[in-house]
Image: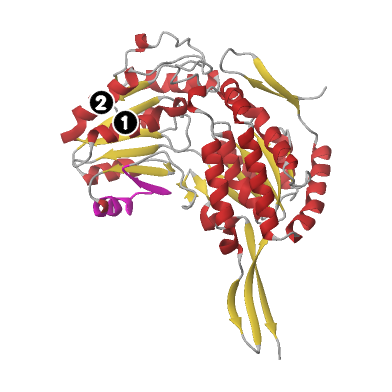
Amino acid sequence: MTKTLKCISPVDGSVFAERPVVSQKEAEAVIASAKAAQKEWVARPLEERIKLVMAGVAKIGEQNDEIVPELAKMMGRPVRYGGEFSGFNERASYMAKIAEESLKPIIAEESDNFERRIEKEPHGVILVIAPWNYPYMTAINTVAPALIAGNAVILKHATQTLLVGERMAKAFAEAGVPADVFQNLFLDHDTTSHLIAGRNFGFVNFTGSVGGGRAMEIAAAGTFTGLGLELGGKDPGYVMDDADVEAAAETLIDGAMFNSGQCCCGIERIYVHSSNYDAFVKKAVEIVSGYKLGNPLNEDTTIGPMAHVRFADVVRKQVADAVEQGAKPMIDVGLFPEDDGGAYLAPQILVDVNHDMDVMREESFGPVVGIMKVESDEEAIRLMNDSHYGLTASFWTQDPARAAKIGAQIETGTVFMNRADYLDPALCWTGCKDTGRGGALSEIGYQNLTRPKSYHLKKA
């Protein structure tokens, strides 16, 4: 019997989409075709590859009216927010813009006697394993620069957003990217691991859980296959004594609750200087109390269901455990009668929290945030670093020098001042500790999607 992958819609619990998985033998045949096609693809001029990739991006934009409700049905994001094409296009466009400069050879010597240079060669076939929470934007982070650099790409998308990879591969093929150069595969976990262990890929980029990242490392062990891993997060915000409290609350709470809290760099814990604590909590509660939980296909819905019941159950348990340990919930769940005990989950703000509670230490990935009062930068730094994760940290102050000084002491991949929950394609998207390793986007993204090859040519 053929195994299938099923996308269960969080909107109503129905099976929204279903696809059969391919066997290892079938997958290896697809990869072989990709390897053959990559040789011809990399031989094309860079300008041509860029043009075709951006045509594929544009094709996705043309489908946005179909994609937005499709995403709502697959993973629950309200249609009022309009989908992901803006960020999808921004990231691809920036990587296209910097491609020529980023991929040009490094010249050590060009003389009558010697030519010494470092070329940047594509890895060959790259496997991109993309997550469901921002399925288009997270995928394009690697897909666009990998193709531009001359690689072929195999995309394996999350089951929760089953149709995204299929739609992307079809759009890029319609735009002129050779079909064998960019292919979507429906794979189960075991086959994926066997393919990686079999040295089928030159590089693997995975965005997902810490457990998934460990599985990637285990599969790749001994193969010397390069890995890019963006895993969990528990991103902090710190509101200092000189902060604009209104602006801090509006941005940090949006960063904690947008997409039902299912953001890679969403804010999951907030530390507020005692002088601003009461005002910040008051504003935060006011913001969240005004949300409308409901069907994501309705235009008045501001917060939709979580992508799956099991994700909502994790958050419910964290909140219940924290309250049992002394945390105080600030949001009246009676304001959210749509909370059905399933995928629809009322947002929550917790105070009187501490780092003995899972809600302040383990990834929630849902619409809950804990707020703690601090008395100094030193206390805030200690608490922000008291985490297994390190993706982003958001500081709120009028003093850039102070933010930079604190940022230098924080174990994180990105430091924000007076903003949060944003991925800048000009900067490297990276993390430390259990958040993973490697880096996407920026010039560094191209470095990870290519390998250096040195030429030492003696002319005489």
* Circles 2 and 1: CB atoms closer than 8 Å: yes
Residue 394 as seen in the image, left or right of residue 18: left
Asked if residue 126 is positioned above or below residue 319 in the image, the reply reads below
Between 433 and 406, the one lying in front of the other is 406
Residue 224 vs residue 255, the one in the foreground: 255
* Mark identifier at residue 62: none
Q: Which residue appears at 53% of the width and 58% of the height? A: 443
Residue 156 x, y percent position in the rendering: 68, 37
Judge whether 109 appears above or below 184 on screen. Answer: below
Secondary element under disc 2, as helix, strand or loop, is: helix
- Label 1 sits on a secondary structure element that is helix
Q: Which residue is mark 2?
A: 283
Q: Position of residue 152 (x, y in %)?
A: 72, 50
Which of the two labelled residues, at mark 2 and mark 1, occupies the earlier sequence position? Answer: 1
Name the residue: 51% across, 28% down.
82
**Residue on which disc 1 sits:** 250
Pick the quarter of the image with the C terminus: bottom right
| Residue 261: x %, y % from top left | 44, 28
Q: At label 2, which amino acid type do we have?
A: Lys
x%, y% of residue 326?
28, 21
Residue 412 magenta-highlighted: yes
Residue 216 within the segment the image draws in magenta = no
Furthest-bottom residue in this view: 460
Label 2, label 1: how many angstroms apart (C-alpha)?
A: 8 Å
Toward the front, the furthest residue is 62
Which of the 4 image quarters holds residue 383? top left
Q: Nearer the viewer, residue 69 or 273?
A: 69
Highlighted range, magenta:
401-418
| Kind of residue at disc 1 | Glu
Q: Residues within 10 Å of mark 1 (few under 14, many from 20)?
A: some
